[in-house]
Amino acid sequence: MVDGPMHTYRAYIQKGDIHPDTAQELAVEKLQLLHNALKSYQPDSGESGWRARFGLGRRKEAITPPQGLYMYGEVGRGKSMLMDLFYDTAPVRLKRRVHFHEFMREVHDRLKQIREDKLDKKDDAIVVLAGQLTDEAWLLCFDELQVTNIADAMILGRLFRTLFEKGVVVVATSNRVPDDLYKNGLQRDRFLPSIDMLKQKLDVMELASPTDYRLGRESGEHTYFYPLDMDARDQLHAQFEEMTQGQSKNDYVIVKSRQVDVPKRYERIAFFTFNDLCVKPYGANVYLELASLFDVIFVEAIPVLSPKNRNEAERFVHLIDALYEHKVKLVCSAAALPDKLYPEGDGAFEFQRTVSRLMEMQSEDYLSAEHLT
């Protein structure tokens, strides 16, 4: 095999960039099979225009789309890395890789716009959106697929069904087995057919690697200070003063007509407290805007989280997702190490992705990555 994820994966092993891993090799084999199938696949969108109206279009036999892949497993096992290998080598022009949380935020925004723009109320906004998405990319790669609220759950079933009908191929990573998606959610019984559909359309496999690769990364400069004592406070502020040369000032940014205060700012460096960012009722769009504007963000006094402050915890999760996706450097002080920030209770499982990201954001690889605006 001279192309595809298997070729790249083996090259990485030969160079010593990654270590052999039986579980990862099995996943790469499945991704390679899908890669090969995509070479001879093209969604049949049907004939359009005047030829079709007069019945002059070429008749085509229905083409069965290749089965996609749903890869789940514990954090730190290399799911996102394997997704990158597949996506980068996929022989498809119209393809898209996106974090699932960001995708759902976009879905809600676009559905709202479609409903506002359409004069014919008989048009189904979800069907219209599915058509738009298919025209833009018919290979969709979702990182960290999860369903945590009823609004997403009710939309996803119909949206995915329409996408699959249009021949879209999906590859997804997740921390949860499909049967645990939207676990304990409101009216979950209405979401169960969607789970069955995913299991039918996607080859479900567990990436059961015994190794947590987060723990093998060399730590970069000190960017995570704990516990919340005077020493942590002094080190955090001293690092900010050194980076900004003592020239920071109070500022604000506007996100969709809303003012977001920035307590201290110097060029593309900003300083906030946890309360500034996560107690106020900000949505994901605020965090994404901040992540695009700033190269370095300081966050002071991250507390231990639990179901008692679940809203603040969810906002913190969205904040870290946004910073991570844009490769923003995070310097922070916290009450505990990442794996002790949300130790137990409802929401602790979902928080594991954030734990993984907080750990990776301290690594040399992450700190040397270029900021993505």
Image (cartoon, rainbow, N blue to C red):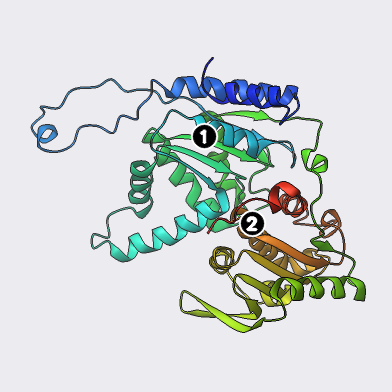
Instruction: From the viewer's perspective, tell me whether residue 202 is left or right of residue 73.
Output: left
The Cα atoms of the two marked residues, 1 and 2, are separated by 22 Å
Q: Please tell me whether mark 1 or mark 2 is closer to you in this view.
A: 1
Front position in the image: 59 or 95: 95
Front position in the image: 72 or 15: 15
Q: Residue at x 73, y 36 (%)?
A: 77
The circle drawn on residue 321 is 2
Q: Position of residue 43 (x, y in %)?
A: 34, 30
Residue type at the position of mark 1: Asp
Q: Residue furthest top?
A: 1
Q: Residue at x 60, y 53 (%)?
A: 370
Instruction: From the viewer's perspective, tell me whether residue 354 is left or right of residue 323.
Output: right
Q: Position of residue 369 (x, y in %)?
A: 64, 50
What is the secondary structure assignment of the residue under circle 2?
helix
359 is higher (above) or lower (below) than 267:
above
Instruction: From the viewer's perspective, tell me whether residue 190 is left or right of residue 41.
Output: right
Residue tagged 1:
88
The quadrant in which the N terminus is found is top right
Front position in the image: 96 or 240: 240
Q: Position of residue 17 (x, y in %)?
A: 71, 31
What is the secondary structure assignment of the residue under circle 1?
helix
Q: Residue furthest front?
A: 245
Q: Position of residue 292 (x, y in %)?
A: 54, 63
Residue type at the position of mark 2: Asp
Instruction: From the viewer's perspective, tell me whether residue 296 is left or right of residue 126.
Output: right
